[in-house]
Amino acid sequence: MANVVLEFKAVSDFDPQSCPVLIIGQLGSLQQINWTQVKGKLLPVVTKEARNASIIPLNPNPTDSCPLYLNYASVAALPSRVSRHNSPSSAHFITRLVRTCLPAGNNRCILMLCEQSDVFASACAIARAFPLFTRRSTSCTTEKKRVTVEFLIVGQDGNHLDPFMLETLNSTADGVRLAARIVDTPCSEMNTDHFLEARYLSLEVKAVASELGISPTIIRGKELKQRGFGGIYGVGKAAEHPPALAVLSHTPTGATQTIAWVGKGIVYDTGGLSIKSKSTMPGMKRDCGGAAAILGAFKAAVKQGFKDNLHAVFCLAENAVGPSATRPDDIHTLYSGKTVEINNTDAEGRLVLSDGVVYASKDLSADIILDMATLTGGQGISTGKYHAAIMTNSEQWETACVRAGRSSGDLAHPLVYCPELHFSEFTSAVADMKNSVAVR
């Protein structure tokens, strides 16, 4: 595993020769922050005149950077303007700048200059620059490297973060890095058993449950079939490691509503008998991204005192090829009781999610259900590389998700919601529906 410890802390003074520093902000913020606020990070090797001179030539298009003193200090400028469907924080550019401009060393600092409204997105963006998983031989060292992140808030007198906000940022960054580690880990080290069992890796479902004082619910293997979870079982039954439905539940006193997050956890997707090609199969270790993100988010939310009932539902399976693999033309009975004729075994995400969503509705009595999934390549065509696709029967939640995406840096954009015009695509002569449209 990578050995970088990331910590968000209050602003303090460092000699850049002992703690190299990267200062990031929009050009206006870099110009607005006065010398007294940053000199503790730069003296004695960088003078006020040198710092001011380094800002003058910056011309972010979309970004720009300048070293202040050898490899000990650098300043980097973010875009001054963004379009209306982007995050005002320029989160994606923050991640790039941290990866490319942070000076080397075992003890480093990032000083982030931004408005209060951009703090959360900026912190998440920085966390993404420090993935936890690696198998590079050069990274096999026990020596810990530390990166400290500090914020100066532009445009207000009290320009430091309070302890609660710092705690929130640390919890959120841990969740972001946990989710990234799970999707970066190959299936040989992250099968369905690994995802569940703390004895394999340190931060999966049972380990998170133990840390939070929660007893997980786990339905696994043939018990899924016996209890009617035909979607999850049908997708994962051919794999060496059995499929599972796992649930973590947070039920605080005084909760007024129940929310369920349902995650697609396909730890590897070969496509099944409708097998993927050599160019589309690599990278399918990431098909558990929805479940991984929900695990990280659940951990962060509960640690920060989430006030309503919150359930995290993980639909875990490996879509493998084998003697017992689902065939096109097979019919599965889902947890809802609906039957599905399989015409594409590579359209498996909707099958496992159906069981999870119905479980959240029927067994957990959720008022609000949100599912998260690396569901289909059609998303990339519809909303592009940087925006997740939102599909919901609630205009209110559609708007809220887009707004939350801009605030957090996890961008989202709505798809057309008009299911009545498309139901006919899934018509089956022998079951309640097919699992894929006629043209795919």
Image (cartoon, grey):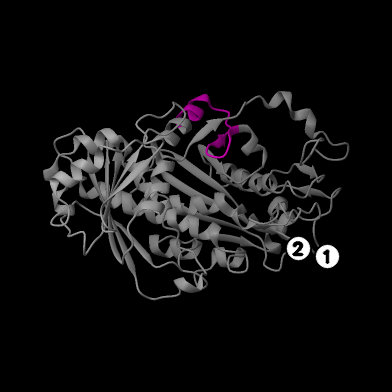
Q: Which residue is mark 2?
A: 238
Whether residue 247 sits left or right of residue 40 in the image: it is: right
Above or below 387: residue 109: below
Which amino acid does the dot numbered 1 rest on? Answer: Pro
Q: Residue at x 34, y 47 (%)?
A: 123
Q: Position of residue 118 (x, y in %)?
A: 32, 37
Dot 2 lies on which element?
A: loop
Kindly report the distance in space between the C-alpha atoms of the residues bearing marks 2 and 1.
Answer: 7 Å
Q: Position of residue 419 (x, y in %)?
A: 68, 27
Mark 2 and mark 1 in contact? Answer it, CB < 8 Å: yes
Residue 366: x %, y % from top left:
52, 41
Q: For the C terminus, give its image quadrant.
A: top right
| 21 drawn magenta | no
Q: Specify the label residue 323 is tagged with.
A: 1
Residue at 80%, 59% (x, y): give it. Answer: 325
Residue 262 appears in the rendering: yes
| Quarter occupied by residue 8 | bottom left
Q: Name the amino acid, label 2.
A: Ala
- Which range of residues does the magenta coloring cover? 383-400
